[in-house]
Amino acid sequence: MALCCGTRICGYRAYFQLSRLFTSTATLRGKNWEVLLNTKRQIPAIGLGTWQAKPREVGAAVEIALKAGYRHVDCAHIYGNETEVGKALQKCIAEGVVKREEVFVTSKLWNSDHASGDVAPACQLSLKNLALDYLDLYLVHWPQEIKKGGRVTPDDVIGYDKERTSTCWKAMEGLVEKGLVKAIGISNFTITKTENLLKTAKIVPAVNQVECHPYFQQPKLKAYCDTKGIILEAYSPLGGPGRSSKRKTDVDILADLVIREIAARHGATPAQVCIAFQLHRGLVVIPKSVNPDRIRENLKATEVKLDTEDLQKLKALDRNLRFLSSVMLKRGQSEEELWDVLQDEHFVLQH
């Protein structure tokens, strides 16, 4: 039986009480929205994403974000920019912009490091690159493994195995015991894969970071995570407009007429509405940008006060449209198999 302490999630103030729509919410503490993790620590509800941030851009973006009020930076070894992120963090700490304990830093274990003997060295490498003594959160980036030294190709992707994932998670739990990380979590896990993990886990994942935006809201996964005390984190909350896998036929969420109408009524941007929507649902949101104006604009989504009618309209936009659908496919595997579509559809939520 997995142990989980303090799995309560904080509630909004009176004008944000929307329990009929969503079961978990965020709370305002000082200037920042935060969510309570099952470790009883707070995580800032908006984090700066660093995926695809180029060299000589990501460091400046981190500095701008911290000076603007961000207190959460989302990183990963595979992004290839943790050293530059670390230099920016240390510069801001040295200049008195922030204290280390005020910044929530996340990194992720890459798919080729799932073997039990590789987990601690991988974490220590991220710590070295970020110039930190500990991580606030360390995630298993994907449940799928990749061959050692391999690339994200169908021939190098080994795929998912519940026993190997269980062994990997045990090594992740060891990082908590060693004090290298404050919390551990998962990313891109389905209900089925999370259920499998919880059968042997001693520590319940603090978060599950997944693709989530108005066209792909993942309500069943959200409800499932709520029952387990796992916070859902949204990457690509704007639909990933800058993703490399974008196709000409893909829709542009920020051009949606409903979102634009709500934005106009609130004097906000479509991006701010998309971010505010996830905050109202109780998710942690990870928008990414290296543009100074966009970085500041995204943070101001905390000031957008959506009402029940707004939320109902946004909820109705869900198309179950996953944009990053074919990532991590192994040879001969379908997207339905990768994402456990049938198993998750048949899974019965326990309330």
Image (cartoon, grey):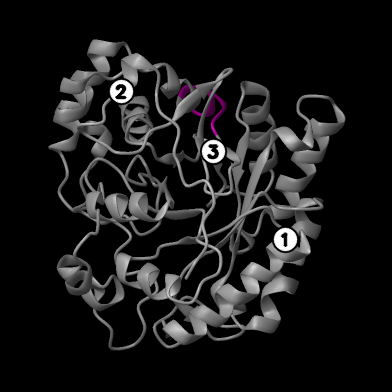
Judging by the rendered image, the residue that carries numbered circle 2 is 17
Name the residue nearer the viewer: 322 or 36. 36
Q: For residue 47, which numbered disc appears in the image?
A: 3
x then y, percent, for residue 187: 46, 61
Q: Is residue 52 magenta?
A: no
Which structural element holds mark 2?
Answer: loop
Name the residue at 21% across, 45% down: 215
Q: Which residues are magenta?
A: 291-297
Between circles 2 and 1, the one closer to the viewer is 2
Tell me: residue 320, above or below residue 34: below
* Three-letter code for the amino acid on which mark 2 is drawn: Gln
Judging by the rendered image, the residue that carries numbered circle 1 is 126
- Figure label count: 3
* Three-letter code for the amino acid on which mark 1 is drawn: Ser
Label 2 with label 1: CB-CB less than 8 Å: no
Res 78 quadrant in image: bottom right
Name the residue at 77% across, 65% down: 178
Which structural element holds mark 1?
Answer: helix
Q: Residue furthest right?
A: 94
Name the residue at 25% across, 78% down: 337
